[in-house]
Image (cartoon, coloured by chain):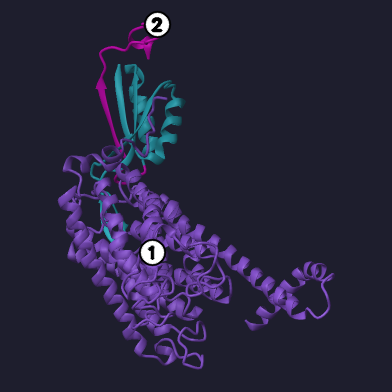
Amino acid sequence: MRNWRVLGFLFALFLVSPTLLAQSAPAPAGSDNARLAKLEQAASEAKSSADNAWMLTSSALVLMMTGPGLALFYGGLVRKKNVLATMVQSFAMMAVITMVWAIVSYSLAFGSGSSFIGGFHNLFLRGVGANPDPDYAATIPLQTFMVYQLMFAIITPALITGAFAERMKFSAMLFFMVLWSLIVYSPMAHMVWGKGGLLNASLGGRFPCLDFAGGTVVHVTSGVSALVCALYLGKRVGYPKQAMTPHSVVLSFVGACLLWVGWFGFNAGSALAAGSLATSAFVATHFGAAAAVIGWSGAEWIRNGKPSALGAISGAVAGLVAITPAAGFVGPMPAIVIGLIAGAFCFFMVATVKARFGYDDSLDAFGVHGAGGTLGALLTGVFAVSAVNPIFKDAQGNPLPSGLIDGNAHQLLNQAVGVIIAWVLAIVGTLIILKIVDVTIGLRVTEDEEVQGLDLTQHGEEGYSWEVTA
Amino acid sequence: MIKIEAIIQTSKLEAVKDALHEIGVEGMTVLEVRGHGRQKGHTEFYRGREYTVDLIPKMKLETVLPDAIVEKAVQAIVTAARTGKIGDGKIFLSKVDEAIRIRNDERGEGAL
């Protein structure tokens, strides 16, 4: 890795030297220091450009996960009459959460504040410009960091929509999501990733919880909130007696494949630079997803006698969820282990546990994201090693062991603290928000509207109109 | 005039159509339908949950013929559509009182 850095530096030197020579030719003798300073600046600018290019690409990839990735994935799983309503719930997050983020929630998540939540210092993105914030990412503009994090803030609430699909009012969904972004997402992001956060592992939090790309922040919070929503709203009319099969596994298939690709931006981008850590996270992400396809499909094959397409793509998503917190801390082989376990475990959650308890988590937001996120966060504490990412250091700057197999059994406890806080925050926050929305504008559509479908009753249109008459 | 309604396996449509053309049947209407007789449906699994699909896709072929060739047509359909397994379908025959060609108001068997 060091060799590459040196090579990269020499290459940068090679690129900038003609310019420097041309500029320095007329300068008086004895200005070596000035030349060196210029050189250093040019090298750091080159690194900054490389990192920034990757981070802008990653930001776009993460946005693509929500639209069209998640929109297609969820859209295919609902019945035909709800396809547009389901897709637009994800799409609406791309617009609405962006506004909330710009005005206040970026500041609440990443501004300086208490251990639990940021302050109002960066309201309206004040102070978020071209200069990097070394606490977060020393080589990219803070504005890049801000927009990258925004894409996470968009997809997280969009994941919840799977739990209340096919029965929630569009207006109630919007109101719920704005409040959720403020009350659940922002504090959790601040605790894990923000300056002074209680669980922040890289900035010296009280309980350093390893969460590379959002196992707790994104998947546990959204998945657990999803379960609370499913329980509070109640079942869809006719569930579980009436068959509610996916209207197009084909759409879901395309969506899941887009999610897999976008996830490289999600996980490898969380290195916040284009170096070898990004590569390591990229590899772990891919291996985790691939192994989980095998885990889920294998379990399904044994239990039901056939490996389904929906099972294979659901397995991929489960693996991507579980590897998310671990991506930048574990090697490729542990990533495979995490994926295999996650695939089989999430299949068990949606096929057995959901049926036993009878809640209507329509598209399995809890079974995949809540369960997979919790599993991944805990397994990160097992498989994290300092050889991949020396996140903990002693006073002299020497790396300390990361997870259980690295010799730091205590980390499991920190991971558990992170998971418990995420669960409690998600349960309490979501219950409060649901109550507020329930008493003000009401959560569910009427039974008639639900039977007619949300496309027609909420949006006045239909997803498919293949009439015979032209 | 007799109306033939034949409910057959979707995979047998081409064979039945060809067999009818062979004996000189010139017109027919085909519909995609779903239903079941004695054939039980199949099961599908979505995320581990089992669903029974008891209305199975079938093809329904309708044609109205002069009495003279009805029996030949029935034999053609039966021969072409039979696999010998449950689910091969059924044929219904019924009397038709009148046929009218919209283009020129022609009536009776000439309109077929």
Any part of residue A264 in sight: yes
Please name the residue shown 78% across and 78% down the image.
A31
Does residue A81 sit above or below A244 in this rendering? Answer: above
Magenta stretch prevailing secondary structure: loop
Please name the color used to draw chain A.
purple
**In the rendering, which numbered label is found on residue A107?**
1
In the figure, the cyan chain has which letter?
B
**Image height of B101 relative to A22, above or below:** above
Q: Give the CA distance from mark 2 to mark 1.
A: 78 Å
> Tag 2's secondary structure?
loop
Asked whether residue B77 is drawn in magenta, I would say no
* Callout 2 and callout 1 share a chain: no
Specify the quadrant that holds the C terminus of chain A: top left
Q: Which residue is mark 2?
A: B104
Q: Quadrant of the N terminus of chain A?
A: bottom right
Chain letter for mark 2:
B
Q: Which residues are magenta?
A: B83-112
Residue situated in front as seen by the camera: A445 or B20: A445
Q: How many marks?
A: 2
Per the image, label 1 sits on a secondary structure element best described as helix
Task: Identify which amino acid the numbered label 2 is placed on.
Answer: Asn
